[in-house]
Image (cartoon, coloured by chain):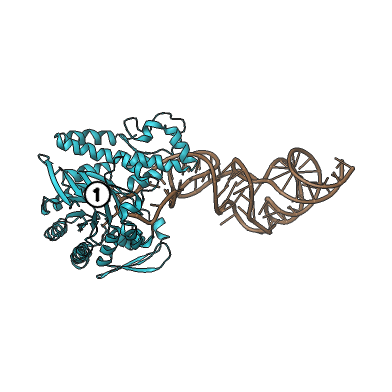
Amino acid sequence: MKEFKFEVHRRLDGALARTGTITTPHGVIETPAFIPVGTKATLKALTPEQLADVGAQAVLVNAYHLYLRPGHEIIDQAGGVNTFMHWDYPTFSDSGGFQVMSLGVGFKKVIDMTGVTDEKSLARKEKLAWIDDDGVRFKSHIDGDMHKFTPELSMQIQHGIGADITFAFDELTTLHHSYDYQVESLDKRTHPWAVRSLAEHQRLNALRSHRPPQALFGVIQGADREDLRRKSAKFLGAMEFDGFGLGGALRKENIGEIVRWMSEELPEEKPRHMLGISEPDDIFECIENGADTFDCVSPARVGRNGALYTRFGRANVTRAQYRDDFTPFDATCDCYTCRNYTSAYLHHLFSSGELLANTLATIHNERFIVRLVDDIRASITDGTFFELKKSFLADYYSKK
RNA sequence: GCCGGAAUCGUGUAGUGGCAAUCACAGGAGACUGUAAAUCUCCCGCCUUUCGGCUUCGUAGGUUCGAGUCCUACUUCCGGCA
């Protein structure tokens, strides 16, 4: 059975960008790579075959959601998430750390980088998570039952799920938290929780030797503070993690710089995963500064909501102007949707509320981001990264 | 022909003597970054960038301090009876 392994192949002159391969029990990931998110062990609206066709090399599922339903024991009984969801390629599982924020403090604040930016819609929401230094108490969003997550339970869940790459349980703070809170969050929760996650992970890997060994990535926090990001990266970088998740509240204006702080402190021979990042400009910045993999719900969610990426920016296909536009939404795209359907047809599917709208839009958006990162990987190999970055972003922000 | 009922935003409606325009749908625009999301927000009579101004409850009269609301006639529609 293949052990987890990361190899760097090519480094870009004048930047921290690099290509490599992550080897897992379920196959190899060529990096940099975009990893689509299938929270509940399914990428909404796609079959695993459709997801593979889009070029996805791996999928990321979520411990919190699968713990609530169907329960990680069920997935364990099924033989692990790969078998359960009929996905033969590598898998990641998130720890539930994001839900500490999105179900907790995220309920009432305007948060950057969380998908929730509207105070009015937030006002109607109910807080469902409460943090203390031992862990987080959650009220299930499904039935209101109380549950408590700890680093140990998160790892037990993630071992039941059986993903190739797991993440340490962390606290995602927001840019609205004070400096003092960020310090306290690192010292009292994210870092101690990383220690506990790693210990439990090692115990479970030894205990469950009948299953493929799993890898664990430590998650770095510290918001937009250089001293905290470096401190967090240094602390976690010295531990026996297989790689790192670069988490959290990242100020978009200097996201590359923030990633660089962490990359400079982290061991070079371990992979760096950007949690929840997929905007094209962010991807370029992160890769340039040392990021290897990305996951994000955005391509899928945004697609289901009617917005599609194009070489010339993202636009809503629900707009009236597309009602009689019989050209592909992005003529430069090689995806199944753009090869076979027109903007007018997609517009019709969305306005009719047809389910195929979700499938075709998701195929396109996932392909668009996967392909972008694939192109970036090739550009690192042949040394044209900066040319690609310049030309792509010039087109992308010329607006469709 | 007679009897009864109805007429409010593009549509269906709320409104039962006191600032008309509630709710839904349709329509328009936008948002979405480790998924409480096939979701959410805003606009949706006219004018105005805003503040705000103006108009309007089938038509014409009447009662009343005041009428979408009560009365009369007419028009149209829906029932029922001939």
In the rendered image, the vertical position of residue A310 relative to residue A156, given as above or below: above
Residue A208 drawn at (x, y percent)? 23, 62
- Residue A27 lies left or right of residue B36; in this view the side is left
In the rendered image, the vertical position of residue A150 relative to residue A330, given as above or below: below
Q: Which chain is brown?
A: B
Residue A85 drawn at (x, y percent)? 35, 51
Q: Is residue A254 visible?
A: no
Q: Is residue A145 visible?
A: yes
Instruction: Indicate the quadrant where residue B16 lies.
Output: bottom right
- Residue A174 lies left or right of residue B10; in this view the side is left
In the rendered image, the vertical position of residue B76 relative to residue A157, given as above or below: above
- Foreground residue among A227 and A369: A369
Residue bearing mark 1: A26
- Residue A65 lies left or right of residue A250; in this view the side is right
Which chain does tag 1 point to? A
According to the rendering, which colour does chain A have? cyan
Dot 1 surroundings within 10 Å: few (below 14), some, or many (20 or more)? many
Residue B22 drawn at (x, y percent)? 56, 54
Residue A109 drawn at (x, y percent)? 33, 59
Rendered-image quadrant of the C terminus of chain A:
top left
Instruction: Indicate the quadrant where residue A20 lies.
Output: top left
Local secondary structure at mark 1: loop
Q: How many marks?
A: 1
Which three-letter amino acid code belongs to the residue tagged 1? His
